[in-house]
Image (tube, rainbow, N blue to C red):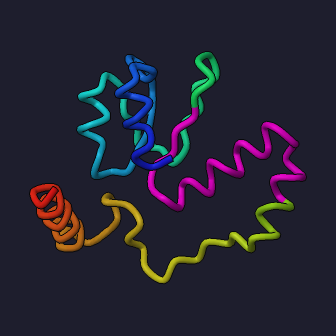
Amino acid sequence: MCTGSLILGAAGLLAGRRATTHWLAVDQLRALGAEPVDERVVVEEEHRLITAAGVSAGIDMGLTLAARIAGEQVAQAIQLGVEYDPQPPFDAGSPHRAPAEVVDLLRARSRFLAAQA
């Protein structure tokens, strides 16, 4: 999930395949040969691969996997058990909806942290 898809890409497992990752890492995913898509969870059936975007999308991925393995009712029971009922206080969970200044702030912070590494 999240930037873990970069590991799959670095291993050559995503070459030419649809995948997702955290929005700040999309260019890196593309550079590794993947075809980035703007989806929270991407299932590549033929290649038995699944990727997820940011951290909260990892929950969606977990529920998707649970449904595939144990059925939708079990996945729904897990969702209820962890009370996963997203109701974010802001509509800023995507760079497409967040205010531009917030997106710019996070991009600048990301560049700063990368320069420190």
Give the total of numbered labels.
Answer: 0
96 inside magenta stretch: no
> Residue 65 appears in which quarter of the rendering?
top right
Residue at image location 88% in from the left, 52% down from the top = 74
61 inside magenta stretch: yes
Relative to 101, is 81 on the left or the right? Answer: right
Q: Position of residue 79 (x, y in %)?
A: 76, 63
- In the image, 116 versus 89, the foreground residue is 116
Q: Position of residue 98 (x, y in %)?
A: 31, 69
Residue at image location 37% in from the left, 37% down from the top = 6
Q: Position of residue 38 (x, y in %)?
A: 41, 43
Residue 10 versus residue 107 in the image, above or below: above
> Residue 109 appears in which quarter of the rendering?
bottom left
Residue range of the region highlighted in magenta in the rendering: 50-76
Is the stretch drawn in magenta largely helix, strand or loop?
Answer: helix
> Residue 45 appears in which quarter of the rendering?
top right
Residue at image location 45% in from the left, 27% down from the top = 18
Relative to 44, is 94 on the left or the right? Answer: left
- In the image, 80 versus 109, the foreground residue is 109
- In the image, 57 versus 2, the foreground residue is 2
Quadrant showing the C terminus: bottom left
Residue at image location 40% in from the left, 23% down from the top = 11
Q: Position of residue 85 (x, y in %)?
A: 68, 72
